[in-house]
Image (cartoon, rainbow, N blue to C red):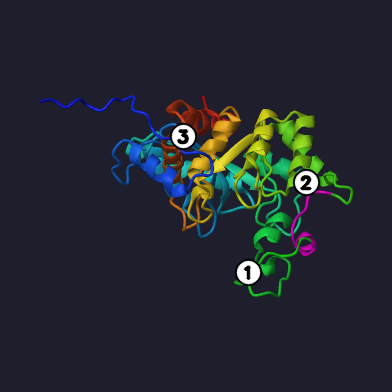
């Protein structure tokens, strides 16, 4: 008596939208198969570009991360933040010099790496002239305000030492009322609801230089004002970071609308991590709804509560494949689309 092998075309149950997370989770984890992993080697990240990782003080080490990414065949890392934030491009150059020496000694092809710059990491927004100087120094991506935006402070609070220099540096507030948050954090619109002239000047520099710009943690009115400016200026490298995050919080219809206007949606491992807890099935469904032409995957990792960025990229790619995207689609959003946002060596 013989037993026939299971058909490779076996039908998999597809849960309805809104199904319990455990249901979609178990179906995905049982069906998904990847190459055998041999820690610390990581399979599944060859050619990948992470356009949003962190390596500033107290986070993952920028050089060790670059070595790890190189050994495992990644193509590049865009450091949104790095030790030496005042001149991040200089910091990345130092990392690349050390990485090249190490790679030569070990016969490894080194990754490429780039620097990002946040216009709102200090008490005041930087000037357009400072943005231009940073780009001339080598920065390839500009982030609008993140942690110190009024929207972030309204949603999760912040260290009061940011706006009260006498406060305990280890303190952290809860969410602040909107009026108070606007006094403590950066807000990009004027009293008429239009982008402040300083912000418009920054966008003109972005348009002149062709670098990437992230709308970051903006409230919806700020985001759509920046969208209008980006479209008016013809920016081709504008993106919305972590659209499921509590700061951005876009509906799938809003994501679809942005993608239709050629604004990239940058989904992150942070969103599906235990800290934010977005269902990977819902992320996959959102990507499926928007299409993959203007979608990227990134880690947004660096903090000690996250895996390192290389492992995070393996995981988010694996999740998206397990929950329904094809290999080609996952490569599109983690290899090919990110390559359009950074300057690559030939």
Give me the residue at 28% from left, 25% from top.
7
Gap between marks 2 and 3 measured at Cα: 33 Å
User: Which residue has dot 3 on it?
Assistant: 48
Regarding residue 342, the answer to whether it shows in the image is no
The answer to which of marks 1 and 2 sits earlier in the sequence is 1
Q: Position of residue 332 (x, y in %)?
A: 51, 28
- Residue 293 lies, with reference to residue 195, above or below; the image says above
* Label 3 packing within 10 angstroms: few (<14), some (14-19), many (20+): many
Q: Which residues are magenta?
A: 179-189
Asked whether the beta carbons under mark 1 and mark 2 sit within 8 Å of each other, the answer is no
Q: Which image quarter: residue 199?
A: top right
The answer to which of marks 2 and 3 sits earlier in the sequence is 3
The numbered disc on residue 221 is 2
Give me the residue at 65% from left, 33% from top.
256
Identify the secondary structure beneath mark 1.
loop
Asked whether the beta carbons under mark 2 and mark 3 sit within 8 Å of each other, the answer is no
Q: Is residue 275 magenta?
A: no
Q: Position of residue 175 (x, y in %)?
A: 68, 64
Query: Please, which residue is most extreme toward the left here?
Result: 1
The answer to which of marks 1 and 3 sits earlier in the sequence is 3
């Amino acid at each position: 008596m013989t037993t026939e092998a299971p058909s490779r075309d076996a039908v998999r149950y597809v849960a309805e939208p809104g199904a319990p997370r455990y249901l979609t989770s178990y179906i995905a984890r049982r069906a998904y198969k990847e190459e055998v992993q041999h820690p610390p080697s990581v399979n599944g990240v060859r050619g990948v570009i992470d356009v949003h990782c962190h390596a500033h003080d107290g986070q993952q080490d920028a050089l060790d991360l670059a070595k790890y990414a190189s050994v495992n065949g990644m193509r590049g890392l865009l450091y949104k933040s790095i030790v030496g934030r005042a001149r991040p491009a200089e910091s990345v150059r130092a990392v690349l010099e050390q990485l090249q020496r190490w790679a030569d000694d070990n016969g490894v092809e080194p990754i490429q790496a780039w620097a990002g710059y946040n216009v709102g990491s200090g008490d005041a927004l930087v000037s357009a002239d400072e943005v231009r100087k940073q780009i001339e120094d080598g920065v390839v991506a500009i982030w609008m305000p993140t942690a110190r935006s009024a929207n972030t402070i309204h949603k999760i609070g912040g260290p009061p030492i940011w706006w009260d220099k006498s406060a305990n540096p280890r303190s952290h507030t809860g969410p602040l009322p909107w009026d108070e948050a606007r006094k403590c954090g950066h807000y990009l619109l004027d009293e008429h609801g239009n982008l402040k002239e300083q912000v418009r000047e920054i966008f003109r520099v972005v348009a002149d230089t062709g670098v990437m710009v992230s709308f970051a943690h903006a409230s919806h009115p700020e985001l759509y004002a920046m969208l209008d400016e980006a479209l008016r200026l013809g920016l081709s490298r504008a993106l919305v970071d972590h659209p499921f995050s509590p700061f951005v919080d876009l509906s799938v219809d809003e994501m679809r609308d942005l993608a239709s206007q050629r604004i990239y949606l940058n989904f992150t491992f942070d969103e599906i991590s235990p800290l934010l807890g977005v269902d990977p099935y819902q992320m996959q469904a959102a990507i499926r709804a928007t299409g993959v032409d203007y979608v990227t995957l990134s880690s947004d990792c660096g903090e000690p509560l996250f895996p390192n960025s290389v492992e995070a990229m393996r995981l988010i790619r694996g999740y998206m494949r397990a929950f329904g995207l094809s290999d080609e689609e996952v490569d599109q959003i983690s290899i090919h689309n990110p390559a359009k946002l950074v300057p690559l060596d030939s």
